[in-house]
C-alpha cells in the first residue's frame, strides 16, 4: 500500500488549494493509499534557523510539529502539496516549509531520498492563468531538486466570485493524479 503525505499551506480550511488537495486524496483513498496530513499553518512550526545541522544529518535540528515529516518522507511513495499564491509567489507558510526541506539534499545537492511522485496544487485569484507561471515553475523545481517527479501540477485561477466552484475538469484531474500517486 502506498504512503502519501499531504502538505497544506493555506490558512483557509476550505480554501481552493485545500479543496483540490482533498480531491487528490480521494483518488489516493480509492487506490487504498495511506494518508498523512501536515498543516503548515499550524502554530509552533519554525522557519529554518540556518544552522547547517542538516549538512551532516538527514533531519533538521528543530524538534517541532514538522519534525516527524523527516521519517514520514523517507517512507513515503508520494507527496501532494497545496500552495496559495500571495503577492506573486507561494505564501509564507509554503516558503517556510520549503526552507525546512533542505535535509532532502546532501552534499552538492545530491538527493538523499529520491524517486517520489509529487502532485502540486496552486490557487490564485487572477484570471490570467500564466501570470505566475514563473513562481509555479520555481516551486515545482524544488521538488525536482530533491530527485522527485512532479507528475501533475494543478492551478485554480480566477476564483474571485463568491459562488466560485472549481471546474469539474480540474477536480477530475486531481482525483486521477491521486490514483497515480499510490
Ligand atoms: C495576502 C494575499 C495576497 C494575495 N496575492 C495574490 C496575487 O498576487 N495574485 C493573485 O492572483 N491572487 C492573490 N491572492 C488571492 C489568493 O491567491 C486566492 O484567494 C487563493 O484562492 C488563495 O488560496 P486558498 O483558496 O487555498 O486559500 C492573495 C491573497 C492574499 C490573502
Image: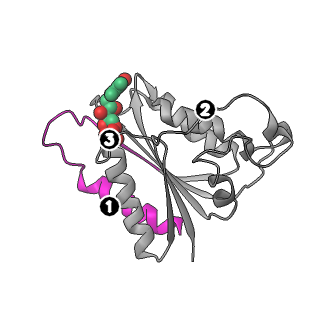
Helix, strand or loop under label 2? loop
Left or right of 170 in this view: 82: right
Q: Residues within 10 Å of mark 2 (few under 14, many from 20)?
A: some
Q: Is residue 91 visible?
A: yes
Left or right of 37 in this view: 57: right
Distance CA(mark 1)–CA(mark 3) = 22 Å
Left or right of 89 in this view: 160: left
Disc 1 vs disc 3: which is toward the camera? 3
Inspect the magenta stretch and tell me whether residue 15 lies in it.
Answer: no
Q: Position of residue 101 (x, y in %)?
A: 66, 42
Residue at 82% across, 43% down = 106
Its colouring scheme is one colour
Whether the residue under disc 3 has CB within 8 Å of ligand 1: yes
Q: Which residue is mark 2?
A: 47
Q: Position of residue 31 (x, y in %)?
A: 45, 76
Q: Looking at this view, is 32 or 132 the one in front?
A: 32
Q: Are marks 3 and 2 in contact (CB under 8 Å)?
A: no
Which region shows up in magenta?
A: 153-182
Q: Are marks 1 and 3 in contact (CB under 8 Å)?
A: no
Lower sequence index among marks 3 and 2: 3
Q: Is residue 124 visible?
A: no
Q: Which residue is mark 3?
A: 12
Residue at 19% across, 48% down = 165
Whether the residue under disc 1 has CB within 8 Å of ligand 1: no
The circle on residue 172 is 1
Amino acid at each position: 500500500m502506498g504512503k502519501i503525505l499531504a502538505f497544506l499551506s493555506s490558512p483557509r480550511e476550505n480554501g481552493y488549494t485545500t479543496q483540490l488537495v482533498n480531491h487528490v486524496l480521494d483518488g489516493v483513498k480509492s487506490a487504498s493509499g495511506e494518508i498523512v496530513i501536515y498543516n503548515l499553518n499550524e502554530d509552533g512550526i519554525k522557519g529554518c534557523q540556518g544552522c547547517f545541522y542538516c549538512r551532516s544529518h538527514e533531519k533538521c535540528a528543530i524538534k517541532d510539529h514538522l519534525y516527524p515529516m523527516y521519517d514520514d518522507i523517507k517512507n513515503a511513495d508520494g507527496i501532494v502539496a497545496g500552495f496559495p499564491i500571495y503577492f506573486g509567489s507561494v505564501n509564507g507558510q509554503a516558503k517556510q516549509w520549503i526552507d525546512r526541506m533542505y535535509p532532502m539534499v546532501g552534499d552538492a545537492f545530491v538527493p538523499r531520498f529520491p524517486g517520489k511522485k509529487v502532485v502540486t496544487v496552486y490557487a490564485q485569484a487572477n484570471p490570467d492563468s500564466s501570470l505566475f507561471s514563473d513562481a509555479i515553475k520555481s516551486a515545482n523545481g524544488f521538488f525536482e531538486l530533491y530527485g522527485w517527479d512532479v507528475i501533475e501540477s494543478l492551478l485554480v485561477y480566477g476564483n474571485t466570485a463568491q459562488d466560485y466552484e472549481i471546474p469539474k475538469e480540474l477536480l477530475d484531474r486531481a482525483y486521477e493524479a491521486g490514483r497515480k500517486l499510490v
